Image (cartoon, grey):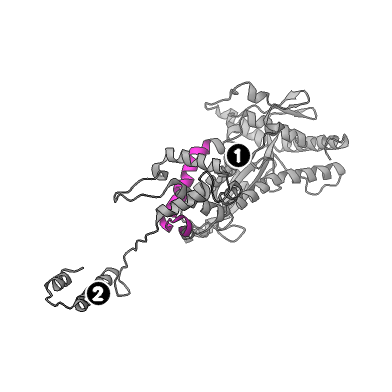
């Protein structure tokens, strides 16, 4: 209140209470107009709303996190996309990594938001793809704080869990994948390869020419490799949408370890022919490399038709992984509303990490997770004999170029595909594969 009105109220000798109230109301209206501005160019001050964050946190805890919550584990899994123990595990690690998710008091001695509130706000945006201000009604967190929550949450998940859940398969993983691939009739296969486009709604106008591709909208490309259990082993994100799958493959690090000789051993035999490089199933746009097996476009013989049907069926693993990823986290299915490329990269990688963590959490203990013996070959022997010695230092340039030429060898591609066709047809004739 201005000094003029204070003196006016203090110096007034009138005993009329209504007159004093009228002066007080006039003073308050004067202060309100001066603080908010009356003209079209005047700056309106930021309004602070009392959201009662304490009661919002108490309601959230009683709904989901107490001993006898209002909503059971099934509804928790449905709304948060993951189980309650997994939620608490991630929250505990995040609180140790970044005190932003620890409940504290600010400089005004006001209690802040709890870690459950912040993580719930981030997961609701990821799971439902909703706007930031729609979280306010239940979690009692404002729009700007919700945006900060999702950024810090995704960055923390990538920094903490990325080395474990975005890694390449190790020796034990390879033995399990090879056993499943051998059951399918594709010895030496590690998964299927494909790309997905994520629309970028708020792409800057200066970048439209680079990010607009065949869908005639700005998109960012994700290259991924998925196995039969929908686990995403390889994720390369960030290429502009104007690039096709071949350009993305050339820029990705999918075969970097293979070129540098820094991978587990890869030796297998098909139809008496020895191979030393694993391969992936892919569609027809990819190049005819020794590490990529494509289908036969127009099969004429019964063996070719059988191979094409099996190939196209197993190649759907990566597409199924894309569908499940987009169904679990709707934010990567709809247009991206963030402005910065780095934020989108953290969001996509965090969703993939959470996707893999959910698969691990819900995986049943079947025969493929224990020692498996197929014929006379122990496919888990790689994972039980300790770590496998691989090259860690730089290799000579001539060896690097020789490995690169071996990866891109088209003759090996056709020979490998012919051997797989023959192998599949023989298994079909023996009744092993229908």
Of callouts 1 and 2, the N-terminal one: 2
Q: Residue at the spot x=61%, y=30% of the render?
A: 170
Disc marking residue 361: 1
Q: Is residue 386 magenta?
A: no
Residue, disc 2: 25
Say whether residue 259 is left or right of residue 96: right
Horizontal and vertical percent for residue 193? 66, 43
Q: Is residue 370 visible?
A: yes
Horizontal and vertical percent for residue 363? 65, 38
Q: Main secondary structure of the magenta part?
A: helix
User: Would you identify the image quadrant in which residue 280 lies?
Assistant: top right
Q: Is residue 315 above or below residue 206?
A: above
Horizontal and vertical percent for residue 320? 68, 48
Q: Quadrant of the C terminus?
A: top right
What's the magenta region? 136-163
Say whether residue 433 is left or right of residue 255: right
């Amino acid at each position: 209140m201005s000094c003029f009105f204070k003196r006016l109220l203090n110096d007034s000798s009138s005993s009329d209470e209504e007159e004093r109230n009228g002066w007080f109301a006039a003073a308050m209206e004067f202060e309100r107009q001066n603080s908010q501005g009356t003209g079209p160019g005047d700056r309106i001050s930021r309004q602070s709303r009392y959201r009662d964050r304490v009661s919002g946190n108490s309601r959230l805890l009683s709904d989901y996190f107490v001993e006898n919550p209002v909503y059971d584990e099934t509804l928790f899994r449905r709304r948060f996309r993951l189980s309650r123990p997994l939620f608490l595990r991630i929250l505990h690690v995040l609180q140790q990594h970044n005190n932003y998710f620890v409940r504290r008091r600010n400089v005004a001695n006001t209690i802040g938001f709890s870690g459950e509130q912040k993580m719930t706000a981030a997961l609701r945006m990821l799971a439902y793809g909703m706007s930031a201000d729609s979280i306010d009604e239940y979690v009692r967190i404002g729009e700007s704080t919700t945006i900060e929550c999702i950024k810090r949450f995704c960055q923390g998940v990538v920094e903490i869990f990325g080395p474990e859940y975005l890694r390449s398969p190790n020796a034990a993983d390879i033995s399990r994948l090879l056993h499943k691939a051998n059951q399918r009739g594709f010895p030496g296969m590690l998964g299927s390869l494909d790309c997905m486009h994520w629309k970028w709604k708020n792409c800057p106008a200066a970048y439209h020419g680079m990010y607009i591709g065949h869908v005639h909208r700005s998109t960012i490309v994700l290259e991924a490799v998925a196995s039969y259990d929908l686990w995403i082993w390889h994720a390369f994100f960030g290429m502009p949408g104007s690039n096709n799958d071949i350009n993305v493959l050339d820029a990705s690090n999918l075969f970097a370890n293979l070129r540098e000789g820094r991978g587990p051993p890869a030796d297998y035999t098909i139809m008496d022919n020895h191979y030393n490089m694993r391969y992936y199933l892919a569609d027809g746009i990819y190049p005819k490399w020794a590490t990529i097996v494509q289908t036969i476009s127009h099969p004429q013989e019964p063996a070719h038709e059988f191979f094409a049907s099996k190939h196209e069926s197993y190649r759907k693993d990566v597409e199924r992984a894309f569908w499940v990823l987009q169904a679990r986290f709707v934010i990567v299915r709809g247009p991206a509303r963030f402005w910065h490329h780095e934020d989108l990269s953290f969001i996509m990688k965090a969703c993939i990490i959470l996707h893999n963590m959910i698969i691990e959490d819900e995986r049943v203990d079947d025969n493929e997770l224990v020692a498996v013996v197929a014929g006379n070959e122990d496919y888990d022997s790689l994972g039980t004999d300790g770590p496998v010695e691989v090259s860690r230092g730089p290799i000579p340039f001539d060896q690097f170029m020789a490995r690169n030429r071996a990866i891109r060898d088209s003759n090996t591609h056709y020979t490998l595909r012919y051997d797989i066709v023959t192998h599949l047809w023989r298994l079909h004739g023996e009744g092993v594969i229908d």
